[in-house]
Amino acid sequence: MIDVIFIAIQVILAVVGIYQFVFSLFGLRRKKKTVHFPATKSFAVLVAAHNEEQVVGALMENLKELDYPKELYDVFVICDNCTDGTAAIVREHGMKACVRTNSNLRGKGYAIEWMLKELWNMPRQYDAVVMFDADNLAAPNFLTEMNDDLNSGARVIQGYIDTKNPEDSWITAAYGISYWYINRLWQLSRHNMGMANFLGGTGMCFETKLLKDMGWGATSLVEDLEFTMRSVQNNVYPKFNYDAKVFDEKPLTFKASSRQRLRWMQGHFTVARKYFFPLLWQSIKERSLVKLDLALYGVNVYIVLLTFLMTASMWVDVAIFNGPNIANLYGYLPFWLSGVAIAANILTFFAALILEKITFKKVYQYLILFPVYLISWYPITFYAFFTQNNKQWSHTEHTRVVRMEEVVQSKQA
């Protein structure tokens, strides 16, 4: 009976892996946008900030220089439980500092929910709401691209999340590689197929009417994934805009990265428990590949956990019990097939770097440590499973001050 269970799990994991790999192939080709619209949409640009005095000034300077009519957007910085000079710096740059103090409901999801209520009560109402983090930088054309998509009928849009510091350390390089891969072979592939894209926590745009109708309601540790699930349940499919780039600061150390990824995985378990089965049932009733795809993305945290447990069990079986005593599906397959599967997955990361025309020398040097980053997801996910009821939001400190001209220069070097 145990052997049957092990084989069944291995078959499921293999099918999901093949499914994801095949889907990634649809991101190899990028269609260039040909339709552009006059700037007509107005935007409330929200910036979530908690003790971000070191980096928020650079973002304020950046947002002043967006290539979009200044009268069509306003910037609101949510100074959430700040104890530093974040609000003062925002005001010095002529932007609106919205101070929130609530020691019980902490985290970006709660801060956004509070800010939206404040926004709806203001005299001026906007066509859409854009969200950034305080450590971000936005490409000059960001709002222009959002305007094009909104005028094309999109209601929820995710921009291209890039990194502003990929050469700072091996861990920032690993983040960069992961995000280039995700943007090109996960997000773009789904965009090309007309599927629902998933939100990434920053560089997001929402139609105001949709937010008012649905409400925010995303207060978990991964508010972006939670809102994605709610949108798709309501037949609103987030779109991906490849040309609207936002540059995010990645953690400099493995310790900071582990803490951030632990929070993500704890939140993913919460969202998977709440939304996977309802979304799966909807996909079956409606025969919707879009909803099935997102349900699989939502439950991916359990797939990572099962992969780790299966692999660990086999290692223990061999090392301690002189195995193999556990049924292994791959033992019945030709050896070369396993090699091809592993090589294909490795090549997808190289393909992403080539397709995205990544020229950072240190990133390629740090590739040798990239497997360490990938493998580290397994113990982090395992620990997150047992601590998933911990709803305590943890702040990732941002200290890397980079300006847009430096990002452009580094890409051209």
Image (tube, rainbow, N blue to C red):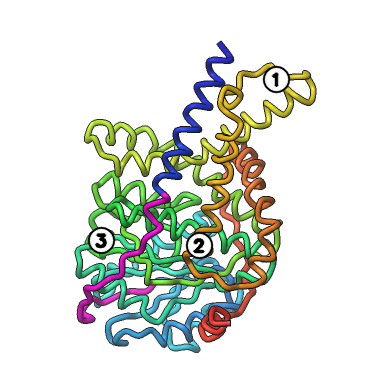
Name the kind of residue labelled 3 in the image. Answer: Arg
Q: Describe residue 139's horizontal placement relative to residue 317 as left or right.
A: left
Marks 3/1 in contact by CB < 8 Å: the verdict is: no
Picture quadrant where residue 156 is located: bottom left
Which circle's residue, 3 or 1, is located before the other in the chain?
Answer: 3
From this view, report whether residue 41 is shown above or below residue 315. below
Q: Earlier in the sequence, mark 2 or mark 3?
A: 3
Identify the residue shown where x is 47% and y is 29%.
12
Please tell me which residue is depicted at 50% across the width and 62% down the height of the picture. 180
When the figure is inspected, residue 375 is found, relative to residue 409, above or below; the finding is above
Label located before the other in sequence (1 or 2)? 2
Q: Which mark is residue 180?
A: 2
- CA gap between label 3 and label 1 equals 53 Å
Q: Amino acid at mark 2?
A: Trp
Element carrying mark 3 = loop
The residue segment tinted magenta is 24-45
Instruction: Tell me the mark number nearer the camera, choosing from 1 and 2.
Output: 1
| Residue 176 place in picture, x, y as percent | 57, 64
The quadrant of the picture occupied by the C terminus is: bottom right
Question: Which element carries disc 1, helix, strand or loop?
Answer: loop
Q: Quadrant of residue 383?
A: top right
Q: Is residue 276 left or right of residue 57?
A: left
Q: Residue at x 39, y 47 (%)?
A: 23
Q: Circle 1 is placed at which residue position?
A: 324
Foreground disc of the pair 2, 3: 2
**Mark 3 — residue?**
155
Q: Is residue 379 above or below residue 239?
A: above
Residue 21 image point, x, y percent? 45, 45
**C-alpha span from label 1 to label 2:** 38 Å
360 or 58: nearer the eye?
360
